[in-house]
Amino acid sequence: MVHVVPTDSSGTRHSMGSCFLGIVALHMEINGVFEGGGVRGIALAGAAAATLDRGYRFHRAVGTSAGALVAALDVAGYTAQELEEEVAGLNWRRLLHPTPMASLPLLGKHLALMTHRGVNSTDRIEAVWSQLLLRKGIRTFGDLPEGALQVVATDLTHGAGVAFPHCLAGYGWNPDTFPVARAVVMSAAVPFLFAPVPLRDTLTGEKVLFSDGAMAANYPIGVVEKDRPVFGFRLSPDGDRHLHQSIRGPYGLAKAVIVSGIRARYSLPRTIEGAHQVISMPVQDDLDFDVTPRQARAAFARAYASVHDQLTPVVAA
């Protein structure tokens, strides 16, 4: 069944029988699935913005890694213009916060892997996303409609894929009081580039380490509810398919493993099952957070244009 809800010009929902002043637009509710892909989250935000401008609204969203970052903003109620301002306009370089050893010359990054399990901390990403969500009145999962958001992470300690907030109770945490931004960075902590995010299991007292959800399910189509049409947002790299990586030392090897893991999955046929519509967008960068504001806005605009062309606008019957 297609769910169409009337809204006023501010995007506020109303019941089908309500009367209100203002411009009325019909919006189709969908459930979105956002693939992971490092800094390619900029493109995912562009795709989400185009989807909103075509008249669709996210009833639920599921995301992995960079997809989790965008999914959280979607269900929080960010508009297309706000996504462009906050994601494409973000200083992505400043999101990288080197762990203590990482800034040392020559051997710093290699030592960081041994001493802190990663070159960067996720604390800056968590702080930025906490602020973005708070602007919409969202701090914990309890501030969102039940089931509106699921983010996929990998439990390194137990070798398991998990979906938050659904799996939080298994670690002794109440989902209603757990910060959304913390769950998002647990999903987005790319191995080696970022240190794993620790969580104390209140049932056992054990410290559990979480990392990038892409290791469990980069395209988490199996997690999404099917109570609305499902739109899958997937990335299609169009850059150099003959990438040659210089592998020197532990950090060089670690980075090559992650970049190859991201790129290799695009070399083989990918499933298109489980979604009513699969939307792909062209991207180039993998883990290069050293993008300029101009490059970020270009990536956003490129994905926006591609998805805007793919989607049929929602119109009144």
Image (cartoon, rainbow, N blue to C red):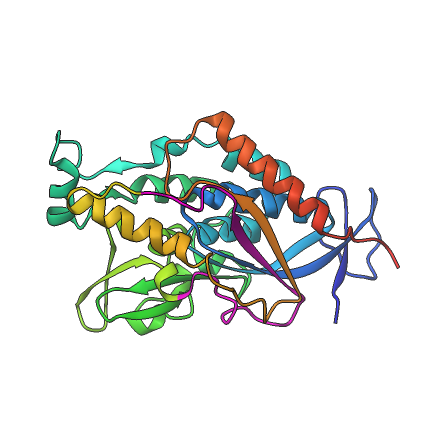
Q: Is residue 83 visible?
A: yes
Which residue shows up at 46% across the image and 32% down it?
A: 90
- Which residue sits furthest front? 242
**In-image side of 284 versus 181 (left or right):** right
The reply to whether the magenta stretch includes residue 241 is: yes
For the residue pair 271 and 78, the one nearer the viewer reads as 271
Q: Main secondary structure of the magenta part?
A: loop
> Which of the 4 image quarters holds residue 317?
bottom right
The image shows a total of numbered marks equal to: 0
Image coordinates for residue 170, horizontal then vertical, percent: 32, 74
Q: At which x and y percent is residue 245?
A: 30, 43
* Towards the viewer: 131 or 268: 268
Q: Residue at x 50, y 72 (%)?
A: 222
Towards the viewer: 278 or 145? 278
Residue 57 in the image: state x and y as whole percent. Answer: 67, 54
Q: Horizontal and vertical percent for residue 31?
A: 61, 62
**Vertical comparison of 239 with 265: above or below:** above
Position of the N terminus by quadrant: bottom right
Q: In the visual, does 254 lie left or right of 27?
A: left
- Residue 194 visible in this rendered orientation of the protein: no
Taking the image as shown, residue 141 lies to the left or right of residue 188, namely: right
Q: Is residue 301 left or right of residue 130?
A: right
Vertical position of residue 57 compared to residue 87: above or below: below
55 falls in the magenta region: no
Q: Furthest residue to the right?
A: 317
Q: Quadrant of residue 154?
A: bottom left
Please tell me which residue is depicted at 30% across the width and 45% down the height of the picture: 122
Q: Which residues are magenta?
A: 217-244
Q: Quadrant of residue 178?
A: bottom left
